Image (tube, rainbow, N blue to C red):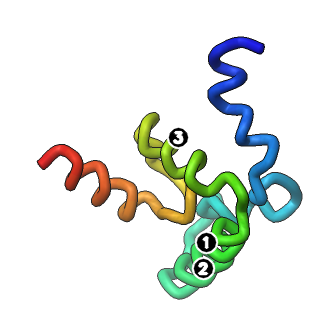
Amino acid sequence: MSAVTSERAWQVKAACRGPHAAVFFPPPSFERKEEKLEREGRAKAICQECSVIDECRDYALKIREQHGIWGGLNELERREILSRRRN
């Protein structure tokens, strides 16, 4: 197994895989604030049941992922963590 493959091996165990994966990212069309909060809430609930939530969060922070829910955090929440780490 290559270093890249083993580094992301956690992804095959992720609860977000499958038909509901779209809930983790904004739709291609406009999304009202209430709709966004509801979608993110559904995604975060899935994350809370996931066995690899920590690995997912660490990965998203490491690569500075700018979109979607990763490791139970949205874009703003990840940005805040990264900002605190720099200070």
Residue type (three-letter) at the residue carrying disc 3? Tyr
Question: Alpha-carbon neighbours of circle 2 within 10 Å: few (<14), some, or many (≥20)?
Answer: some
Q: Is residue 87 above or below residue 47?
A: above
Quadrant position of the N terminus in the picture: top right
Residue 75: assigned label? none
- Spatial CA distance of label 2 from label 1 is 5 Å
- Left or right of 86, for residue 25: right
Residue type (three-letter) at the residue carrying disc 2? Gly
- Left or right of 20, for residue 68: left
Image coords of residue 66 (percent x, y) = 44, 47
Question: Alpha-carbon neighbours of circle 1 within 10 Å: few (<14), some, or many (≥20)?
Answer: many
Q: Is residue 35 above or below residue 83?
A: below
- Left or right of 61, for residue 5: right
Q: Secondary structure at mark 1?
A: helix
Q: Secondary structure at mark 2?
A: helix
List the single residue furthest toward the top. 2
Between 18 and 31, the one nearer to me in the picture: 18
Image coords of residue 67 (percent x, y) = 51, 51
Residue 59: assigned label? 3
Q: What residue would you read off at disc 1?
A: 44
Image coords of residue 27 (percent x, y) = 65, 63
- Kindly indicate whether the residue at mark 1 contacts the one at mark 2 (C-beta within 8 angstroms): yes
Question: Alpha-carbon neighbours of circle 3 within 10 Å: few (<14), some, or many (≥20)?
Answer: some
Residue type (three-letter) at the residue carrying disc 1? Lys
Between 16 and 25, the one nearer to me in the picture: 16
- Spatial CA distance of label 1 from label 3 is 16 Å
**Residue at 75 percent of width and 52 percent of height:** 14
Between 20 and 60, the one nearer to me in the picture: 60
Q: Secondary structure at mark 3?
A: helix
Residue 41: assigned label? 2
